[in-house]
C-alpha cells in the first residue's frame, strides 16, 4: 500500500495526539478540598467508574480513529499499487515511452479521443529531469522511435509527440517492445542506470494479450498508462464484407459482418454501395457479438466492382470502422479444360461425372474476388442443364484428348482438370507445369496407377515451386483399394467447411475405390493434405505452385460412390473455388502492414500497370463508390506512393510495405482495371475491450516491477477511497455522539 | 452562680433572648437537689398531684384527714417532687467535625465551631436552671470527661474544655461512649452532638442503647453542614479525607446525584438508628444560626 500524500500520515498521527494533548493542557486543575464525606464520594465514583471507563475508552478510540481516518483520506492510500515512475526522483535513468497509435486510440470517451489523453499522459513522462534520457516509440503496425536511443532532447521528443496522429492500423505490440528493449539494453557492463518503460495505450485485448515483455532488461520498471475508460465505450463496426455465389442465377450472396460491442442488442442497418447500385441490409445484433447480414444481389457484367458498406444512423466511439470498402471481382464464366482419354458420352465414366458436375455448376463461376473482399459468380449466363456449352456459343467444359493436346485451347482454360489421362507426354507435362507457375490451377483426379508417374513427372517439371506434401505411388500388386472412406478431414477449412455440422454424416456415407497409395514427403506441408483415407493415404491434396496450384483427388470416381451422392457437386465446386481462389488470402491487406500480392495472370506483365488510390480516377468505373474522381490519372507506382509493381517468375507482383489509408486500390492498364484490392482496418481494432490490469502487471510483465494506472485511477478510484475513509470518519463521529447519548445517564 | 464570660463561644447578650427558657426533659429524672424537673420520687413535699385510696402500711402522715372526716374513706395525698437533672454533653471531636472550616488552622464556619457555640450555650442554659452539666469529649476514645456539676467554676471549666476542643482523626466513637457509660453512675440526660460520619455508627447506637436501658434520656443532635449535603460546583476537585482516608480526584458533576443519594441514605440510617434506640433525634444544620437551633430545641423540649 502506498500513499499519494504520505506526509498526511504524519500529520494524522500528530493530529491524533492533539486530542490527548489538548486534554492534558486544558485539563481542569483540581481544586483541593477537604471533605468529611469522602467515603460517599468514593462509593459514588466506584459505582460510576465502570461505565465511565467503558465510555471513555470508546470515546477515545472513536476520536482517535476519526482523526486517523481523516489523515488516511487525505493521504489517499493506493492498495496494491507500486510507486509511479513519474514520482521517482533523482538518479540517472533511461526511459522509453511507447505510445500506441493504433486505430482504437481514436475512440472517443466523453467527447475526447483516447489519443489526446494518451498524448497528455506521454508528455508527462517526457519532461526534463537531471540524469534522465528518454525516447519515444510511436507504435503502430510498424513502430518507429523518434531517436535511435534515449536522448536528452526533450523538446524534439515533445515536438514529435505533438505532431503524431492516430493511424488506421493495429499496433504490433511485440515489435514495439523489441524496439524499446533495444533502446533500454545496457550498452556496457557498468551501465547501472535505472530503466523505465512507459506504455501509453488503451491496452486493447486483441493486441496486448500476446504481448511479450521478455526482451526487456530484467530490471526494467514498467509503467502502464491506460487511457481507456473503465467500461469499454460503445462501438459498432462493419467487420467484414464478402460476396459468395448464390444459386445458379449468377447472383451474389453479400455477407456483411457487423459487430455490436455494446451492452445491449441493437438494430443495425448497413448501406452497401457497389458501383452505381446500393442495398440496405439490416438486422439485430446481440450485445458483444458480431452478426452477419446477408443479401442476395445481382451483378450485371464481369469485371472489377468496388464499393463500401456503411453503418446507418450510428453514433459510436469509433466512427472510422463504420465504413468498410470492398471489392468484387465479377468474372466471365470459367472455362474448364478436361484432359481425359475417356470418350465423351460414355457412361458411367469418371470424366463424365466431372463434366456433368462442372456443367451443373452453371456459371459456376466461382471466380476469385480480390482485395479480400469478395467472390462473385459470373453473371447468370450459364444455365443449369447446359452441359458443355453456354448458350450454345462458348463451351464451359472443353474435352481435350491427351494424345492430341491443343496447346492454345488448354492455355485458354481457367481451370485444367485431368482424369484418366493415361501417360502424359513430356510436352504436356511441361505445358501443365508452365500453366501452374503462371497461375493456372490444375485439378488432377488420380484414379489409375499411371497417374502416380504423371504426378511425379509433373513435380519434377515444376521444380522447387511445387512441393507436394505426399508422394503418390501405384498400389502394390494384390492391394485392393476399395471401401475406403475419409478418416480425417479439415472440417474447418474449405472444401469441407461448407458442409458445416452435417459433414460427419455426409462423409460417413462416402466410399472410395481406386487411387494411389501415398507417403509423406519430407519437404511438404502437412496443411496441404485436406483429407486422408482410413488406410492413411492422402485423399485430397492441394499445393501451391508458384502463382498457381495443384489439387489431387486420389480416387477413381467411377468406382466410388461420391459422384452418386449430393456431396459431389458442392465438394467439387468448393475445391475448384479453393484452387482458383488460392491467392485471395494473400491479397487481404490491412493498413500499415506489408503486403505482397500476386496479380492474376490476366493482369500480364508489370510493365504498363499503374496503381490508383482511393481518391484517384480509374479508367473504368472508378467513381463507383470510392473517393472524389481526380481529373488526372492517379498516382503511379513509380512514385512509391502505393508500393511497387514487379515481374517475378510467377507473374506480376505488387508489393507495398505500408498501405496507408483504407480504401480501394486499383491496378490499371490502359485505364482498364486489371486488379483491385481493398485495404481495410483490422477488424479486431473495433473491439475496444481492454486487457485487465492484473494480466498486464502480473502475467505479461514476466516478473518485472510493473505499475498500472488507469484513466480513472487518480480521479475516481482514489476519490472513492477518500470517500470511504471520510464516511468511516463520519461514522466514528456519529458513534461518538451515540456513545455520549447512551452513557449520558 | 457567676457567669463566666471568658469563652469566646459564650455570647450572653445573644442568650438573653432565651432567658426565660429552660431545658426540660420528657421523662422523670433523678436529681440531688430541688429543681425544676419532675423527680422519679413521689413524696409529700412537692406539688399536689392526686388522691389515692389508702392501703395498709402506708405512711399515715400522707393521709388526708379532712377527706377522711368528710367522706369516711381514707385517702392519701400524692405530691410530686421536683429535682434537678444531670445533663452530659457528649461532643464528637473526630476530624470530620472540622469540615466547613474556612482554613486549616481556623475552625470558623466548621461543624466543630457550631458545636462549640451550641454546647457552650446549652451548658449555660442548663446550669442556669439549677441543673448540672457534664462534658464528655469523644475522639478515639473518651478524650476528656467532666462530671456533671453546676458551680460557676465547673461551668467555666466546661466552657474552657469546649473552647479548647481539638479534633482527632478517628472513625470510631463507640468506644468513647462505652467508657463514658462506665463512668456515669446516675441517670441523667445524655446529649450527643456529632455528625455521625464514622464507621461504627451501629456500635455507637448500641452503646447509646446501654444508656437507655439504664434510664437515661438520650438526645441525638445530628450536626450536618450544608456543603456535605451537596457537592460543590466545578469541573474538578481533589477531595481529601479529614480522617486519614486518602484523597480522590473527580468531577463532582459526574457523581453529584449518586453522592446525594448516598448522603441521604446516611442521614436516614442515623435517624432510623436513633429512633429505634429510643433516642430523641434532631438534625442540626450549621446553616441555621445556633441560637435559632437552640431556641427551637428548647421550645420543642418544653412541649
Image (cartoon, helix red, strand yellow):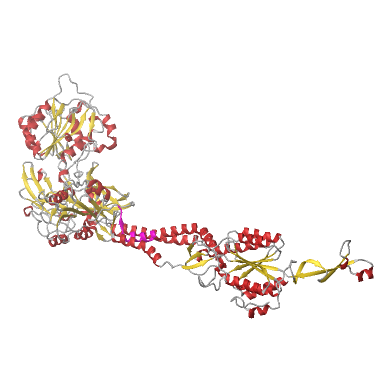
> Picture coordinates of residue A181 (x, y %)?
15, 49
Please tell me whether residue A59 is drawn above or below residue A482 in the rendered image: below
**Residue B138 at what x, y percent from top left?**
60, 64
Residue B27 in which image quadrant: bottom right
Residue found at the far bottom of this picture: B13
Q: How many marks?
A: 0
Residue A459 in the image: x percent, y percent?
Answer: 9, 32
Question: Looking at the picture, does residue A287 appear above or below residue B265?
Answer: above
Instruction: Report the front residue among B271 and A184.
Output: B271
Q: Is residue B12 visible?
A: yes
Q: Is residue A709 left or right of residue B280?
A: left
Q: Could one spot residue A324 in this view of the protein?
A: no
Q: Please tell me which residue lies in front, A12 or A511.
A: A12
Horizontally, residue A182 falls left or right of residue B241, namely left
Q: Main secondary structure of the magenta part?
A: helix
Rendered position, A116 above or below A577: below
A618 or B10: nearer the eye?
A: B10
In the rendered structure, does residue A65 fall within the stretch colored magenta? yes
Q: Position of residue B131 (x, y in %)?
A: 70, 71
Q: Quarter-wise, where is residue A650 in the image? A: top left
Magenta-colored stretch includes residue B203: no
Q: In the image, which residues are magenta?
A: A64-79
Left of B145 or right of it: where is A358? left
Amino acid at each position: 500500500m502506498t500513499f499519494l500524500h504520505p506526509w498526511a500520515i504524519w500529520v494524522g498521527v500528530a493530529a491524533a495526539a492533539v486530542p490527548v494533548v489538548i486534554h492534558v493542557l486544558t485539563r481542569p486543575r483540581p481544586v483541593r478540598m477537604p471533605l468529611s464525606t469522602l467515603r460517599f464520594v468514593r462509593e459514588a465514583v466506584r459505582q460510576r467508574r465502570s461505565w465511565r471507563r467503558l465510555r471513555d475508552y470508546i470515546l477515545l478510540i472513536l476520536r482517535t480513529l476519526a482523526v486517523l481516518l481523516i489523515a488516511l483520506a487525505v493521504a489517499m492510500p493506493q492498495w496494491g499499487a507500486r510507486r509511479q515512475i513519474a514520482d521517482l526522483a533523482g538518479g540517472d535513468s533511461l526511459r522509453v515511452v511507447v505510445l500506441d497509435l493504433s486505430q482504437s486510440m481514436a475512440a472517443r470517451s466523453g467527447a475526447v479521443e483516447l489519443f489526446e489523453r494518451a498524448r497528455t499522459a506521454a508528455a508527462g513522462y517526457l519532461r526534463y529531469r537531471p540524469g534522465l534520457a528518454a525516447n519515444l516509440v510511436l507504435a503502430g503496425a510498424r513502430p518507429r522511435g523518434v531517436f535511435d536511443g534515449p536522448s536528452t532532447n526533450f523538446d524534439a521528443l515533445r515536438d514529435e509527440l505533438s505532431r503524431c496522429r492516430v493511424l488506421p492500423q493495429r499496433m504490433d505490440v511485440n515489435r514495439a517492445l523489441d524496439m524499446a528493449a533495444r533502446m533500454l539494453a545496457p550498452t556496457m557492463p557498468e551501465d547501472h542506470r535505472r530503466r523505465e518503460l512507459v506504455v501509453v495505450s488503451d491496452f486493447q485485448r486483441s493486441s496486448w494479450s500476446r504481448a511479450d515483455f521478455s526482451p526487456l532488461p530484467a530490471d526494467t520498471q514498467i509503467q502502464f498508462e491506460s487511457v481507456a475508460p473503465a467500461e469499454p465505450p460503445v462501438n459498432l463496426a462493419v467487420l467484414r464484407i464478402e460476396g459468395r455465389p448464390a444459386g445458379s442465377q449468377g447472383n451474389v450472396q453479400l455477407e456483411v459482418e457487423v459487430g455490436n460491442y455494446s451492452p445491449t442488442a441493437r438494430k443495425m442497418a448497413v448501406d452497401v454501395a457497389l458501383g452505381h447500385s446500393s442495398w440496405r441490409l439490416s438486422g439485430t445484433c446481440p450485445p458483444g457479438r458480431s452478426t452477419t447480414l446477408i443479401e442476395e444481389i445481382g451483378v450485371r457484367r464481369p469485371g472489377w466492382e468496388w464499393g463500401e458498406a456503411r453503418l446507418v444512423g450510428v453514433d459510436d466511439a469509433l466512427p472510422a470502422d463504420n465504413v468498410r470498402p470492398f471489392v468484387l471481382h465479377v468474372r466471365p464464366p470459367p472455362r474448364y479444360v478436361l484432359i481425359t482419354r475417356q470418350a465423351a458420352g460414355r457412361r458411367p465414366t469418371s470424366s463424365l461425372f466431372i463434366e456433368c458436375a462442372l456443367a451443373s455448376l452453371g456459371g459456376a463461376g466461382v471466380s476469385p474476388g480480390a482485395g479480400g473482399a469478395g467472390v462473385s459468380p459470373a453473371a447468370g449466363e450459364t444455365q443449369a442443364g447446359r452441359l458443355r456449352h453456354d448458350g450454345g456459343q462458348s463451351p464451359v467444359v472443353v474435352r481435350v484428348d491427351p494424345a492430341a493436346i491443343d496447346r492454345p485451347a488448354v492455355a485458354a482454360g481457367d481451370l485444367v482438370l485431368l482424369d484418366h489421362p493415361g501417360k502424359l507426354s513430356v510436352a504436356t507435362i511441361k505445358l501443365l507445369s508452365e500453366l501452374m507457375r503462371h497461375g493456372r490451377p490444375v485439378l488432377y483426379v488420380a484414379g489409375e496407377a499411371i497417374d502416380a508417374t504423371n504426378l511425379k513427372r509433373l513435380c519434377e517439371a515444376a521444380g522447387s515451386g511445387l512441393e507436394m506434401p505426399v508422394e503418390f505411388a501405384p498400389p502394390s500388386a494384390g492391394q485392393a483399394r476399395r471401401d475406403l472412406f475419409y478418416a480425417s478431414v479439415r472440417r474447418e477449412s474449405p472444401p469441407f467447411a461448407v458442409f458445416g455440422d452435417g459433414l460427419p454424416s455426409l462423409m460417413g456415407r462416402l466410399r472410395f475405390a481406386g487411387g494411389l497409395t501415398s507417403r509423406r514427403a519430407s519437404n511438404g506441408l502437412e496443411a496441404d493434405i485436406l483429407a486422408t483415407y482410413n488406410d492413411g493415404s492422402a485423399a485430397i491434396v492441394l499445393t501451391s505452385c508458384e502463382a498457381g496450384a495443384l489439387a489431387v483427388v486420389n480416387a477413381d470416381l467411377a468406382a466410388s460412390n461420391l459422384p452418386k451422392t449430393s456431396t459431389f457437386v458442392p465438394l467439387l465446386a468448393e475445391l475448384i473455388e479453393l484452387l482458383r481462389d488460392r491467392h485471395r488470402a494473400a491479397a487481404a491487406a490491412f493498413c500499415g502492414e506489408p503486403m505482397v500480392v500476386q496479380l492474376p495472370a490476366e493482369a500480364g506483365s508489370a510493365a504498363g500497370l499503374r496503381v490508383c488510390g482511393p481518391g484517384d480516377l480509374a479508367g473504368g468505373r472508378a467513381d463507383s463508390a470510392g473517393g472524389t474522381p481526380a481529373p488526372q490519372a492517379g498516382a503511379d507506382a513509380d512514385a512509391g506512393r502505393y508500393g511497387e509493381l514487379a515481374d517475378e517468375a510467377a507473374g506480376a507482383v505488387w508489393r507495398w510495405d505500408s498501405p496507408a489509408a483504407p480504401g480501394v486500390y486499383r491496378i490499371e492498364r490502359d485505364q482498364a482495371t486489371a486488379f483491385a484490392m481493398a485495404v481495410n482496418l483490422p477488424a479486431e481494432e473495433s473491439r475496444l475491450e481492454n486487457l485487465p490490469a492484473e494480466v498486464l502487471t502480473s502475467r505479461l510483465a514476466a516478473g518485472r516491477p510493473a505499475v498500472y494506472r488507469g484513466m480513472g485511477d487518480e480521479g475516481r478510484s482514489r476519490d472513492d477511497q477518500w470517500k470511504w475513509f471520510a464516511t468511516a470518519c463520519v461514522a466514528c463521529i456519529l458513534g461518538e455522539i451515540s456513545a455520549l447519548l447512551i452513557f449520558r445517564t | 452562680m457567676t457567669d463566666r464570660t471568658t469563652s469566646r463561644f459564650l455570647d450572653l447578650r445573644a442568650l438573653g433572648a432565651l432567658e426565660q427558657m429552660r431545658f426540660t426533659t420528657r421523662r422523670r429524672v433523678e436529681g440531688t437537689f430541688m429543681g425544676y424537673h419532675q423527680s422519679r420520687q413521689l413524696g409529700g413535699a412537692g406539688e399536689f398531684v392526686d388522691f389515692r385510696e389508702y392501703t395498709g402500711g402506708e405512711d399515715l402522715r400522707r393521709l388526708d384527714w379532712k377527706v377522711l372526716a368528710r367522706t369516711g374513706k381514707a385517702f392519701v395525698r400524692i405530691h410530686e417532687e421536683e429535682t434537678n437533672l444531670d445533663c452530659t454533653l457528649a461532643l464528637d471531636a473526630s476530624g470530620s467535625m472540622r469540615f466547613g472550616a474556612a482554613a486549616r488552622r481556623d475552625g470558623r464556619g466548621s461543624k466543630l465551631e457550631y458545636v462549640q457555640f451550641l454546647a457552650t450555650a446549652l451548658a449555660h442554659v442548663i446550669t442556669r436552671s439549677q441543673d448540672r452539666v457534664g462534658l464528655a469529649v469523644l475522639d478515639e476514645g473518651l478524650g476528656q470527661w467532666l462530671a456533671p456539676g453546676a458551680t460557676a467554676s465547673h461551668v467555666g471549666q466546661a466552657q474552657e474544655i469546649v473552647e479548647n476542643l481539638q479534633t482527632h482523626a478517628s472513625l470510631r466513637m463507640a468506644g468513647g461512649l462505652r467508657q463514658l457509660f462506665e463512668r456515669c453512675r446516675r441517670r441523667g440526660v445524655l446529649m450527643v452532638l456529632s455528625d455521625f460520619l464514622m464507621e461504627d455508627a451501629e456500635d455507637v447506637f448500641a452503646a447509646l442503647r446501654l444508656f437507655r436501658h439504664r434510664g437515661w434520656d438520650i438526645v441525638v443532635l445530628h450536626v450536618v453542614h450544608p456543603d456535605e449535603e451537596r457537592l460543590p460546583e466545578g469541573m474538578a476537585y481533589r477531595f481529601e479525607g479529614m480522617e486519614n482516608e486518602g484523597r480522590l480526584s473527580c468531577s463532582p458533576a459526574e457523581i453529584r446525584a449518586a453522592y446525594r443519594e448516598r448522603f441521604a441514605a446516611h442521614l436516614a440510617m442515623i435517624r432510623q438508628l436513633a429512633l429505634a434506640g429510643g433516642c430523641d433525634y434532631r438534625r442540626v444544620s450549621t446553616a441555621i444560626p445556633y441560637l435559632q437551633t437552640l431556641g427551637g430545641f428548647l421550645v420543642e423540649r418544653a412541649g
